[in-house]
Amino acid sequence: MVAAARVWEVKAEGLLRGACAALAAAAALLVGLSTQTETVLFVTKKATVKDVQALWVLAMAAAAAAGYHLLQLLKCFYLGRRVGGGASPCRRSSRALAWTCLLLDKACAYTTFATTVAAAQACVIALDGAHALQWTKLCNIYTRFCEQIAGSLVLGMLAAVGTAVLSAASARNVFRHYSPGTHAAH
């Protein structure tokens, strides 16, 4: 019964890592490839991700998060083959590896969340403007660009939430190494 539960946990973690990788990659691609060209008063202007520093940082952080989740998936597959497909191959790691995964999961969750929120804050200024700073609204001109960025922000936030759940699973894995009822590898 315990072995079946652990197999389910590993499969659930793998599915969640795959979903987080897909969400983060989609957010990075959507924000990174979004452009729109408009002509205003005979002047042609192009909106790109490089116009807003926070969006560029979001694209890079989301791409890094997607790569990290793919590497974690490969680690699980490798450990599964090395151990021989036991009940919980991802969980049979050493304490040092468990702590490293926990810290990396935490860093990934915080970075993904922070960059997504910072990009959202920059987008609010583009949406509403900042009259005190004499910044005008941009989303009434670049509507499609702003809609694509909004979609990437939603995907980025979903990836951040999924990464936070994975971080909790990593914390549980660390604590398993210290519980008296288990005999985890040290």
Image: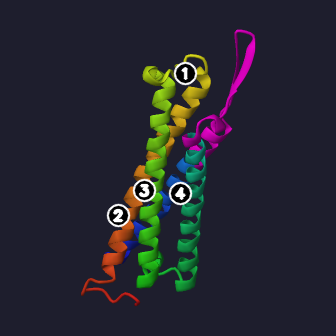
Q: Is residue 26 magenta?
A: yes
Q: Nearer the viewer, mark 3 or mark 2?
A: 3
Q: CA distance from mark 2 to mark 4?
A: 16 Å
Q: Are marks 1 and 4 in contact (CB under 8 Å)?
A: no
Residue 22 in view of the camera: no
For the C terminus, the quadrant is bottom left
1 or 2: tag closer to the N-terminus: 1
Q: Which mark is on residue 139?
A: 1
Q: Residues within 10 Å of mark 4 (few under 14, many from 20)?
A: some
User: What residue appears at the point 47 percent right and 55 percent down from the top-left corner?
Assistant: 111
Residue occupying image coordinates x 43% and y 49%: 113
The label shown at residue 110 is 3
**Amino acid at pointer 2:** Ala
Label 2: how many Cα within 10 Å (few below 14, some 14–19, many 20+): some
Q: Which mark is residue 29?
A: none
Residue at mark 4: 18
- Mark 3 and mark 1 in contact? Answer it, CB < 8 Å: no
Residue 87 painted magenta = no
Q: Quadrant of the N terminus?
A: bottom left
Magenta residues, as a range? 25-54
Can the viewer see residue 59? Answer: yes
Left/right placement of residue 12 relative to residue 46 reads left
Residue type indicated by callout 4: Gly
**Circle 4: element type:** helix
Q: Earlier in the sequence, mark 3 or mark 4?
A: 4
Label 1 and label 2: CA atoms lie apart by 37 Å
Q: Which secondary structure, mark 3?
A: helix
What residue is pinned by disc 2?
A: 168
Q: Earlier in the sequence, mark 3 or mark 2?
A: 3
SS class, disc 1 = loop
Q: Amino acid at mark 3?
A: Tyr
> Looking at the image, is 139 positioned above or below residue 181?
above
